[in-house]
Image (cartoon, helix red, strand yellow):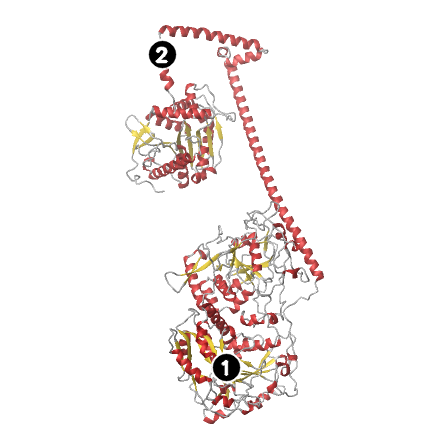
Amino acid sequence: MTLPPLFSCHFPSHMKNCFNNEVDILWYQPEFTQSRYPPGQKLSEACTLICLLVAVRISRGNVSICDIENCSRLNIIVAEAIIEGNAIHAWLIKKRLISHPYLNTEDALKHGGKSLNILKEWKFNIFHEEIETSLYKNINIFLHEWYKNPKCHTLFMLLITCGRTILFIFQETTSKVTLFDSHSHTTDNSNHGLVIAQAPESQNIIPLALRLTWTLHEHAHVRQKPQETRTYHADAQRIRNEDTWIDVSNWITLEQLLMVHHTTADDAYASETHLGTRSVGSPRSRRIAPARDPGSRKTKETMRLCRNTYETLPFYHNRTGREMCQWLTHIKLSRIIILTSVILFIVPLFTHYYLSKVESDTPDRDMYRTFSTLEAFEDFTSMKASQLKMRIEEMFRIKISVSNELRDLSAKRQRLQGEVNSLTQKIDELKQELLHQQTDLDRLKISVEQAQVAQKEAVERNTPELAPPKRILINTLPVTLSTTDPRSCRMYNCFDHSRCALTSGFPVYLYDPDQFSVVSPGWDVDGFLKTTIKQTLGYNPHLTRNPAEACIYIVLIGEALSLHQKSDQRHNKALDIKKLQALPYWGGDGRNHILLNLARRDLSADSGNIFSNLNTGRAIIVQSTFYRNQFRDDFDLIVPPILGPPGGDVWQECAQMLPARRKYLLSFQGEMRTFMGTPMTYQIDDTDVDMEKLIIDDNNIDAFIIQYLKDMSNGITLDKFFIQFECIPASMESKPVETLDWSLCGTDSSRRAILKESTFALILAPSNATLLTTSFMQARLYEALRAGSIPVILGGDQILLNYNEVVDWRRAVIFLPKARVTEMHFLLRAVPDNDLLTIRRQGRLIWERYMSTAQGVVDTTIAVIRDRLGIPPLPASQTPSPSVFNESFVPLKSDAIIAEPEAEESLGPLEPPYPSPAFKRNYTTLLVQNHEIWNDWMDPFNLYPQLPFDTVLPSDAKFIGSEVGFRPIGKGAGGAGKEFSESLGGNYPREQFTIVMLTYEREQVLINSLARLYGLPYLNKVLVVWNSPKPPVEDLKWPDIGVPIHVIKAPRNSLNNRFLPFDAIETEAVLSIDDDAHLRHDEIMFGFRVWREHRDRVVGFPGRFHAWDQNYHNAWNYNSNYSCELSMVLTGAAFIHKHYTYLYTHWLPQAIRDKVDEYMNCEDIAMNFLISHLTRKPPVKVTSRWTFRCPGCPVSLSEDDTHFQERHKCINFFSQVFGYMPLLNTQYRADSILFKTRIPHDKQKCFKFI
């Protein structure tokens, strides 16, 4: 608290007095008092609040008051207490929370606020006694016991009487008593403010306390102005009429609060006029035995000091005495004599009359004699000393007996009251337990009903359970069959399906190119290709070492390079057909053989002419260049040239997708070299067109195209073009080009620089119409997609692109006939930005998955052949789930369950673990969603147990013929909360979810989080990913939550372990949750129900968003502020599909996972990027939860500032890897349907709080 500027080293000043050489009194300056401090303070009655606040501050600060004159800390405490007490009292008066300005201790504690909360925890007793006896009778016993065996180092005594409150402080460590009075005082010499006095402690503390009070008032004769006196007495009259009570004395310790309630301010005035004759109290008052030796001289002196102290307080009313004295001075002497005579005559008559009447009315003479003996003064002289002693001893025994009886009754009353309280508490607990048991009973009823339905379905089930295909393999080599014309080969007449069973797994055998070389002497296969193909096929799961069980056989033919540079070497055939037909598993006709002729350095048309005039039998030819009458539809396969690395991440090779429109609207670099060579007569039959005439036709449209493009680049529009038709080819061909095809210009880096600045890349089809596809054209396509330049193929109606039977190239390439060259400019300008970026994104996906690396080309080639045969891919590999415990160790179980603090509600049945049906669409996915597999999901290489994109049945199917597994609400009739809680409903059959919880050396936090999962419906199991290299302690007790808890030993400490596709996860739904996240059961259930309707998205609770950096442009920031728009849901508490754990581990670029390990951060951002990239949808946030707090948990990494700085860097790095920002914004959250909806009283809402 900041004190007013007036408070300094010179303020407050004081004047010191010493009384009897043992009491030090500090009189402070007039400005330092409760009614004048701080400056501007008006008249204050907050003395009770101020004293209590002083006691609280001394207690909390453990202040030791050795010398009041040198204790500056005490002055600061007093100043702070005055400021706060006056402020609280003024607020209470303003709000009219109290009926009068004088507060007793109970009112002060009730209205004092948080500052006095510590005092509310102390126990207290209440006493009502006469003013003469209360201090000695009730307090001395307590002080005596405290002095003998103190329970604390400091004892506080609060004395309240006549509207004034004084604080006494007894400290065991200093052996001194301190007095504090915050009122202002007026002495004979000068005006003074508040008073602080101190004296050494003695064996009897009460007389010392009273001595301090007496000393204070001996030195400060209190005189009040008449106006103030009248005001106070008016208030006192009002208080007396309302029968209220103000405390006289309150005793406070750190462990016990003893409050002694006495008389009101007005009754203090009455005690002055009838001192010793009036008993003040209420019917609820109770007597406490006084201390021993009440008649001692010291005790009488103490009582006299007590009485005098009370008479000198501010509310002592002496107006009646003055008026009586004035009246007596004016009365005549005769009247006084007459009045005295009358009184002396009348009083004895009345006394004698009533005494005789009492004697006559008393039937028992002994009783009268006893009464007269005990009460009549004149009878005491007639009794002997021994009799008086016996009487006194008898009275003491009676007193002790009564005191003991009262003490026993009080103890019995307290015991009975305690029993009543305990029974009341037990009743409340039983009511709560009844509610819990009723809820459990409802759950069990629902569970029984669901179990009966499941049993009925199991009995009536007539469909076989599907699983990953079992492999059925051939164990014999191919036999020789009759020959077939190679030009008429198709899959139905040239492929042996008997070697490729649907459940075979599609085994592939590779002829070792070093052992089984099929090239002619003087030729050899490119060393890079030879090594790369062997390596990449080694990673392919279809590869087999046993040729007898193989479905297809791969023969690496090229790229075949000449070992000699002689001019006549080109006339020799690179392929030795005899070696080819002599392969051990050729089978006479080469069926089921794949002849792999890949282009890398030689991109000319001659690279595809290696099979010219050769009989390859029934073998499938795979290469990049095909002549139109050489290519066999749905049999041969077009592949891109191997222009990329063997494998790995290729995101660094790609350009960013933004901005949508670049410097050049269209670019082209190429040159056509014409050379008339020997025609390939064997390829031309009578039905073919006259290709030679087409080549030399003067009306060839290519000349017109070239001229039009030159004119367009020099047009009047503001669009920029980069068109070059004359350049030095990058291949530096030493031999003439035998076909009319456009060669490449410049180097790879120069072409890449132009393409990165081009919105569209022009690709001209070969002028030679006999060519169906060429390596040059495939290379241009490769480079355009890599640079993010949209390919525009002029003459696209006469060519085919790689993997054309499975890849939808119309989503990534613009095909135009050559005749539309005049409309091309208009068409390109008509493409809007959103379509432009969509096409660019699709082209990049195709390039990354199928063309960018040798691994991608080989895997795609095998996948296309397998797709033709309708054979499903092999199941995706799962991560093993080794237990952190060894086989012999049995972890300890704990029965302690952390009860949910919220009111319980029935959220669903408790079912046994039920795994989600897996591999149900092994063969039908290729039929129903083959296009999506190749062009949307980009993953034809693996078979997954479930997909988030599985098709949904119509609503009526769950009632007509396909009802197995469905749990419609109200059996189809619908309903509100009760029916809703009994069934899962929705558009999918029943299912459960698995919780995956990542933890690192926070055992107790983990155990508490696990215990809170007890009784959670639809929970299949809990997987705890133990990220620490240290195993859990052996005596750690794991809670029994009703479902299995599987603790997985992580291979290393990595946040990527959160998203490993563990084989122990048997459900589609995965709840990824942190070990310190506290979710209520209803929140988890609602999130699960929402996820079932958005299975392909992240559904969770804590929302975040990416924000554009206003200071440093071209950058993103991670933002966790409250916002009406979000783009991420943190996976610290979110539902995802298990399918995304496969993609995160095997499909996501390795650079992202490495960045997560580098920062030990950002794995949740990476998962949001992945899902938004694949689905182009934002996440779904449920409920109003924005963040989670874990009281008592260790400080997490997320609270460090570097945590947010790393997340800023992660967002920008991930956007570079993906080439754009895939996150999308959403402006709504999901709540239950009946949330905040008024419904009839006989209906229930879906959830009570959601």
Which residue does the numbered mark 1 point to in the structure image? 529
Image quadrant in which you'd find residue 51: top left
**What secondary structure is marked by label 1?**
helix
Q: Position of residue 1230 (x, y in %)?
A: 53, 55
Q: Amino acid at mark 1?
A: Leu
Q: Earlier in the sequence, mark 1 or mark 2?
A: 2
Residue 1079: give x, y in percent of width and height. Answer: 53, 53
Residue 235 lies in what quarter of the image?
top left
Label disc, if present, on residue 376 of the rendered structure: none
- Give 73 or 1209, whichever is nearer the viewer: 1209
Q: Nearer the viewer, residue 216 or 229?
A: 229
Q: Are marks 1 and 2 in contact (CB under 8 Å)?
A: no
Three-letter residue code for mark 2: Leu
Q: Position of residue 227 (x, y in %)?
A: 35, 25
Q: Secondary structure at mark 2?
A: helix
Camera-side residue: 134 or 593? 593
Inspect this view and state whether residue 644 appears: no
Answer left or right for 1128 relative to 883: left
Q: Which residue is mark 2?
A: 328
Locate residue 16: give its quadrant: top left
Residue furthest bottom in the image: 568
